[in-house]
Amino acid sequence: MVAFTKGHGTGNDFIIIADPDGRLELTSEQVAVLCDRHFGIGADGVLRVVRSSAIPEGASALQEEADAEWFMDYRNADGSIAEMCGNGIRVFAHYLVRSGLAVIEPGSTLPIGTRAGVRDVTAGATGYQVDLGRWKLSGDDPLVRVDGLSVTRPGLGIDVGNPHVVVALASESELAALELHRAPGLEPVLPAGANIEFVVPEEPLVRNGIGHVRMRVHERGVGETLSCGTGVAATALAVRYWAGADAPDNWQVEVPGGTLGVRMFPAEDGEHVALSGPAQLVYQGEVDLL
């Protein structure tokens, strides 16, 4: 039997398994069964809590930041490995704090190792904020085909540690009409795949210096989810890019599971993007890994 905790960030839900010494070998098949909503626990992914010193990928995290004791080994619902998860890392940090494995003092940060590099998390009154690091336009701007829209739409490729393609829609009715049970098609196909976000600006777009948009997402290796943290960041970055030089650096993005905040700010290595929002733990249990 393996102990687990179930948690979520704005409805993006995860099975958390503590394996500090890296003794547990989770296969992709086991992850897929655990995440199955009919025959397993049900989740958008699995977060394995392991010390950076106990996982091969953790060596680069410790080289980047010696205090990055913990590594977020994240798997998508289909068992595939993902580089980063913006909602997942907030839930991961919340689990560490609630379990007494880490402390985030006021004004301090908690460095967490990921396959996209070390990410710094801070705690606040409404949840957690994670610095997703430097972002970039990926140069992958495919046409996107999706059920519910009669014509393909252009997408903007954005990398925030994992790949995204953001698509602008014209209206709330178009957003509501999307059928995201099946993965959108990309032309050309991206070899590593991508998370696909569909966004509609609110009216007005900017209120009190903050941008407001609504989004739905199809996550690579998962399907449609109620929220995608890195997708929220990519969406805000894309809309700011389209809006031009006068667009704000602070955004609120509404997803089916709630609302998340995005902030862009300068850093020594270029502009960074930060994501903020809640994280909750909902129950604990034990499960057989078949």
Image (tube, rainbow, N blue to C red):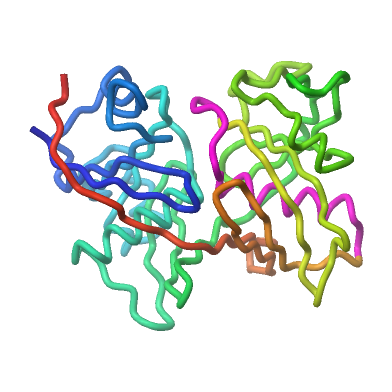
Residue 270 lies left or right of residue 155; in this view the side is left
Considering depth in this image, is 107 or 206 the residue closer to the camera?
206
Query: Which residues make up the magenta segment?
Result: 220-245
Residue 220 lies left or right of residue 58; in this view the side is right
Residue 71 lies left or right of residue 53; in this view the side is right
Q: Work out whether 172 lies above or below 253.
A: above
Q: Residue at x 43, y 82 (%)?
A: 107
Count of numbered badges drawn on the protein: 0
231 drawn magenta? yes
Residue 204 lies left or right of residue 66; in this view the side is right
Q: Residue at x 20, y 62 (%)?
A: 99
Q: On the image, which quarter does residue 196 sit in? A: top right
Q: On the image, which quarter does residue 103 sit in? A: bottom left
Q: Residue at x 32, y 45 (%)?
A: 58
Q: Work out whether 286 lies above or below 209.
A: above
Residue 4 image position (x, y, % from top left): 20, 42
Q: Quick one: quadrant of the N terminus?
A: top left
236 drawn magenta? yes
Residue 220 image position (x, y, % from top left): 55, 28
Q: Work out whether 266 lies above or below 169.
A: below
Residue 68 image position (x, y, % from top left): 33, 59
Q: On the image, which quarter does residue 57 sit in? A: top left
Residue 128 image position (x, y, % from top left): 46, 66
